[in-house]
Image (spheres, rainbow, N blue to C red):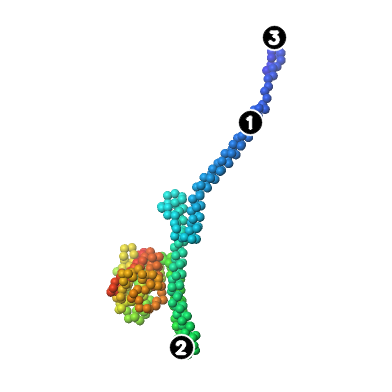
């Protein structure tokens, strides 16, 4: 609105001009609605794109997880084998490979333990059955029944010894580095356990301690469990002498158990460590322990090994255990 003045100066009137604001308000409303719709569409597109991208990125993880779950039930020997970790996926593959490896090792350990139990208990159980069948076959005098019961008791003691040995070995194998032991003391302890057998067979059992004290990085009882079967084997096949020599061998301690028996053939160097296997020089005697197979397995679980030096005239077994 603007005033209008006449020639003489007084106000003659007012001129009023107006325009409607409705179109502008409508345009602003449309812009607001369009902006909200565009924001909603963009939000939906971003969410869909993010979901697709994340799903695409995680699809290999889901596939690897499904494969690992399937392998853990049907084929524990399968591995992803993607090489050294380079990114998140290869790190996950390496982690799953390690997990599958531990599961496979645990399963093999359980299977081996079951096989050893079955192998070691088969003979005493069969003997028990034979003794009871003979005792029940006909009427027997009290002396004969007493002898049968004594035989049954002997086989029962053997069963108990086998079970105790297997359980103790399984427990110690889980954590062999539970302490340290002097190498000379370990050799003496293993030898003293078979003094009666040495006297019975008329075999001299000698121990040559190391020139200076050496500590073995295994539990004392675990070291005895490893050495005992090897010493017993030497006494069973040695003719007149068995010697246990102890010495340092680099970062390990070597226990050399040598005897003057018939020795082990070249073709038997590995076979004698199989459960239940016997060399060609076997005399038919029965042992109550797990023998060389268990000794090697326990030594390897502690980071060592048990090997044999074949020879036609005598032989020797080397037990290597880590030095502390």
| Front label number (3 vs 1) | 1
Q: Nearer the viewer, mark 3 or mark 2?
A: 2
**Left or right of 22 on screen, residue 226:** left
Q: Residue 13 is drawn in which quadrant?
A: top right
Q: CA distance from mark 3 to mark 2?
A: 162 Å
- Helix, strand, or loop for circle 2? helix
Q: Quadrant of residue 276?
A: bottom left
Identify whether 177 is placed above or below 287: above
Which of the pair 50/197 is nearer the observer? 50
- N-terminal label among 3 and 1: 3
> Label 3, label 1: how many angstroms apart (C-alpha)?
47 Å
Query: Which residue matches tag 1?
Result: 28
Left or right of 62, for residue 207:
left
The circle on residue 144 is: 2
Q: Is the residue marked by circle 3 packed among few (<14), some (14-19), or many (20+) residues within 10 Å?
A: few
Tell me if residue 91 comes above or below residue 224 in the rendering: above
The residue nearer to you, when weighing 14 against 112, is: 112
Q: Quadrant of the N terminus?
A: top right
Q: Which residue is mark 3?
A: 8
Give the CA separation, mark 2 to mark 1. 117 Å
Asked which secondary structure carries label 1, the reply is helix
The label number, if any, that marks residue 74 in the structure image: none
Looking at the picture, how far across and down is residue 319, in whole percent? Answer: 34, 68
In this view, the residue farthest toward the top is 8
């Amino acid at each position: 609105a603007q005033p209008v003045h006449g020639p003489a100066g007084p106000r003659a009137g007012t001129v009023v001009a107006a325009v409607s604001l409705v179109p502008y308000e409508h345009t602003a409303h449309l812009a607001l609605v369009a902006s909200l719709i565009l924001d909603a569409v963009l939000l939906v597109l971003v969410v869909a794109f993010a979901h697709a991208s994340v799903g695409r990125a995680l699809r290999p993880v889901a596939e690897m997880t499904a494969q690992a779950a399937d392998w853990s039930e049907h084929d524990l020997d399968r591995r992803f084998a993607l090489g050294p970790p380079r990114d998140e996926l290869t790190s996950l593959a390496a982690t799953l490979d390690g997990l599958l490896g531990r599961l496979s090792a645990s399963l093999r350990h359980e299977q081996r333990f079951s096989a050893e139990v079955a192998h070691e208990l088969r003979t005493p159980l069969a003997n028990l059955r034979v003794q009871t069948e003979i005792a029940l076959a006909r009427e027997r005098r009290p002396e004969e029944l007493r002898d049968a019961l004594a035989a049954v008791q002997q086989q029962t003691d053997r069963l108990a010894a086998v079970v105790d040995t297997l359980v103790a070995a399984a427990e110690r194998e889980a954590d062999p580095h539970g302490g340290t032991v002097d190498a000379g003391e370990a050799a003496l302890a293993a030898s003293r356990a078979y003094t009666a057998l040495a006297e019975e067979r008329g075999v001299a059992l000698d121990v040559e301690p190391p020139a200076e004290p050496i500590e073995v990085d295994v539990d004392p009882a675990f070291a005895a469990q490893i050495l005992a079967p090897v010493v017993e084997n030497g006494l069973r096949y040695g003719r007149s002498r068995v010697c246990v020599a102890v010495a340092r061998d680099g970062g390990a301690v070597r226990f050399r158990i040598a005897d003057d028996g018939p020795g082990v053939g070249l073709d038997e160097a590995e076979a004698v460590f199989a459960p239940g296997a016997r060399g060609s020089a076997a005399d038919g005697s029965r042992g109550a322990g797990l023998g060389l197979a268990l000794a090697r397995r326990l030594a390897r679980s502690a980071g060592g090994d048990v090997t044999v030096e074949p020879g036609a005239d005598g032989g020797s077994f080397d037990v290597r255990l880590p030095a502390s």
